[in-house]
Image (spheres, helix red, strand yellow):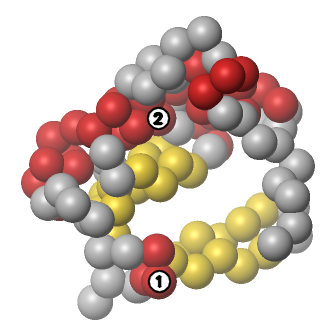
Amino acid sequence: MPVPAVFVTPVDVANGKPAPDGYKLAARQLSADPAKCLVFEDAVAGIRAGVAAGAVVVGVRTHLSAEQLRAAGAQCTVADMSKVSVDRRGDSLLVTIDEQ
C-alpha cells in the first residue's frame, strides 16, 4: 500500500474527535477546502468532527444504524466500503455509492 500524501494522527492535533482539528489539519495540508472533502466515519464522535470541520460526511453502518448515523450528522450512509467506488475525472474524483 502506498504511503498517503497526508497522514494525520492524534499526536498531530491538540483536540481529538469530536473536535474538528484532525479533519481541518488534513484539509489544510492538502490545500483543500474542507467543504470539498468527503469523510467516511462509523462513530458518532468522528461524524461530529467531520461535520464541524465543514466536510460532507458519509456514515458507515459497521455498528450503528443509519438513523443513528444521520442523527449524529451524516448526510447519507453506506453498509460498508465495498459499496463505494472512486473514479478520477481530471482534477476531480467521482465517488459512487451503490446501495440499491
Could you tell me residue 89's position as x and y percent? 80, 74
On screen, residue 85 versus residue 51, left or right, reads right
Q: Does the rendering let one see residue 3?
A: yes
Residue under pointer 2:
50
Could you tell me residue 87's position as x and y percent? 71, 79
Could you tell me residue 9's position as x and y percent? 67, 33
The amino acid sitting under disc 2 is Gly
Say which residue appears at 21% left-offset and 48% top-offset. 70
The quadrant of the picture occupied by the N terminus is bottom right
Is disc 1 surrounded by few (<14), some (14 to 19) or many (20+) residues within 10 Å? few
Q: Does the rendering let one see residue 33?
A: no
Say which residue appears at 45% left-offset and 18% top-offset. 19
Q: Is residue 17 above or below residue 74?
A: above
- Mark 1 lies on a secondary structure that is helix
Residue under pointer 1:
82
Q: Nearer the viewer, residue 51 or 8?
A: 8
Distance from disc 2 to disc 1, alpha carbons, whole Å, reads 21 Å
The quadrant of the picture occupied by the C terminus is bottom left
Q: Earlier in the sequence, mark 2 or mark 1?
A: 2
Say which residue appears at 27% left-offset and 64% top-offset. 61
Q: Is residue 42 above or below residue 96?
A: above
The amino acid sitting under disc 1 is Ser
